[in-house]
Image: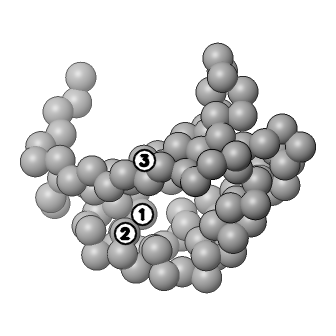
Amino acid sequence: MSDPVLVIARARVLPAERERFLAAARDCIAATRREQGCLGYDICESLTDPGHFTSVESWERRADVDRHMQQAHLKAFLAIAGTCVSAAPVIEVVEPRSVDRL
C-alpha cells in the first residue's frame, strides 16, 4: 500500500452557528467513513481556541479524495458549513513521500 493522502481543513465557526455546524459535521463524518478508500475522518475543536475546528482526513489514494469531493453528503455539509463560518475555510491536500510512525 502506498502512503496515505491527508486532507487538513481549518475553519472558524460563528458561536451562534456552532450547534448547526456540529449536526451537519456528524452526518458528513458518518457517511464519509463508509466511503471507499477512507482510512480516517474526524473534525475536532481546539481546546484553547473555541470555535476553531480542524478536519483531518486520511485516504488510500488521491483518486479517493477526488471522488469524496463529488459526494452529495460532502456537498450538503459544505453548503451548511459555508453559512456557519466567519471566513472561508482553508483546505490542504498533503501527499507525503513517506510516513514515519513515532
Residue at the spot of label 1: 38
Q: Is residue 27 visible?
A: no
Residue at the spot of label 2: 65
Amino acid type indicated by mark 3: Ile
- Could you tell me if the residues under marks 1 and 3 are in contact, i.e. CB atoms within 8 Å? no
- Point out the tag, 1 or 3, that comes first from the N-terminus: 3
14 relative to 50, above or below:
below
Question: Which secondary structure lies at badge 1?
Answer: strand
97 to the left or right of 80: left
What separation in Å lies between label 1 and label 3 (alpha carbons)? 14 Å
Instruction: Name the foreground residue: 6 vs 89.
Output: 89
Question: Which secondary structure lies at badge 3?
Answer: strand
Q: Please tell me whether mark 1 or mark 2 is closer to you in this view.
A: 2
Residue 4, image x, y percentages: 25, 54
Question: Which secondary structure lies at badge 2?
Answer: helix
What separation in Å lies between label 3 and label 2 (alpha carbons)? 12 Å
Residue 44, image x, y percentages: 61, 38
Residue 80, picture quadrant: bottom right
Residue 29, picture quadrant: bottom right
Residue 60, image x, y percentages: 29, 63
Marker disc for residue 55: none
Instruction: Name the foreground residue: 43 vs 81.
Output: 81
Amino acid type indicated by mark 1: Cys
Give the residue at x 16% y 60%: 1
Q: Residues within 10 Å of mark 2 (few under 14, many from 20)?
A: many
- Point out the tag, 1 or 2, that comes first from the N-terminus: 1
Q: Residues within 10 Å of mark 3 (few under 14, many from 20)?
A: some
Image quarter (top left, top right, bottom left or bottom right) of the C terminus: top left
- Could you tell me if the residues under marks 1 and 2 are in contact, i.e. CB atoms within 8 Å? no
Q: Residues within 10 Å of mark 1 (few under 14, many from 20)?
A: some
